[in-house]
Image (cartoon, grey):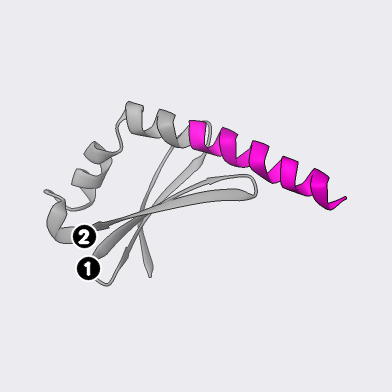
Amino acid sequence: MRILAELPHPDCKISIFGMNQKFIIKFEQGILEQSYKLAETDVIGGVNGVFEFLDETFIDQVLENFSAMRTHFIEAYNRYE
């Protein structure tokens, strides 16, 4: 897997990787991460097409997922204690 690009964002780290004819988009926020895979053939324009795919609405939804993930993690951790 090789890193192709990083997209600056104030609330999370966004990295785009290439592997086995797929783009892997990885979002990281603290201890949490989300990843999404797209076939290279499904994206017009290569990495630039992935940048277009990552619109503000999608990134906002990813950030909402991080919030839910954090809540679920904390709840599970509190049950563990």
| Front one among 70 and 4 | 70
Residue 9, percent from left and from top: 46, 34
66 falls in the magenta region:
yes
Residue 35, percent from left and from top: 43, 53
**Range of residues picked out in magenta:** 64-81
At horizontal 53% and vertical 32% (from top left) the residue drawn is 11
User: Which residue is the extreme one toward the front?
Assistant: 79
Quadrant location of the N terminus in the rendered image: bottom left
Amino acid at dot 1: Gln
| Mark 2 and mark 1 residues within 8 Å of each other at the beta carbon | yes
Residue 57, percent from left and from top: 34, 27
At horizontal 13% and vertical 49% (from top left) the residue drawn is 45
Count of numbered marks: 2
The residue where tag 2 is placed is 39
Say few, some or many: other residues with alpha carbon within 10 Å of mark 1 (under 14 / 14 to 19 / 20 or more): few
Q: Establish if 17 lies above or below 65.
A: below
